[in-house]
Image (cartoon, rainbow, N blue to C red):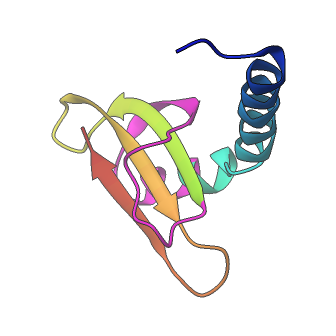
Amino acid sequence: MKTNNFEKKSLIGLSLLTAVLCAGCTQPEHAKNVLEKQGYNNIQMQGYDFFNCAKGDWYHDKFIATGPTGQNVSGVVCAGLFFKGSTTRLD
């Protein structure tokens, strides 16, 4: 099936809009504070994580760090917009 230029431009536009909107869906300083309180150190924030948070989570901050046990870990800090707390999920 052949796609026309309008479909290609629509798909590109939708992809760019999604990327721009998701760029604002991170709170790296908040996520870093959450991780520090949980005993993580050497924290490096990695930007937005598309897949590893729940449906109601608005912020998805990917990270790599040294965990409380001294092991290197990666994961994501998920948080909602208003009254939901933050959740740390490890890969």
Percent of width and height locating residue 79:
53, 66
Would you place residue 3 above or below residue 58 in this image? above
Q: Is residue 40 left or right of residue 14?
A: left
Position of the C terminus by quadrant: top left
Percent of width and height locating residue 90:
26, 44
Q: Is residue 78 left or right of residue 18?
A: left
**41 is within the stretch colored magenta:** yes
Number of numbered discs present?
Answer: 0
Would you place residue 54 above or below residue 74 in this image? below
61 or 9: nearer the viewer: 9
37 or 18: nearer the viewer: 18
Q: Residue furthest front?
A: 1
Residue at 34% x, 51% y is: 39
**88 is within the stretch colored magenta:** no
The quadrant where residue 71 appears = top left
Percent of width and height locating residue 60:
54, 50
Residue at 84% x, 24% y is: 6
Percent of width and height locating residue 66:
31, 31
Residue at 82% x, 30% y is: 13
The range drawn in magenta is 32-58
Residue at 30% x, 52% y is: 89
Q: Which residue lies furthest to the bottom in this view?
A: 83
The quadrant where residue 58 appears = bottom right
Q: In this view, does 68 lie to the left or right of 56?
A: left
Q: Is residue 87 left or right of residue 82?
A: left
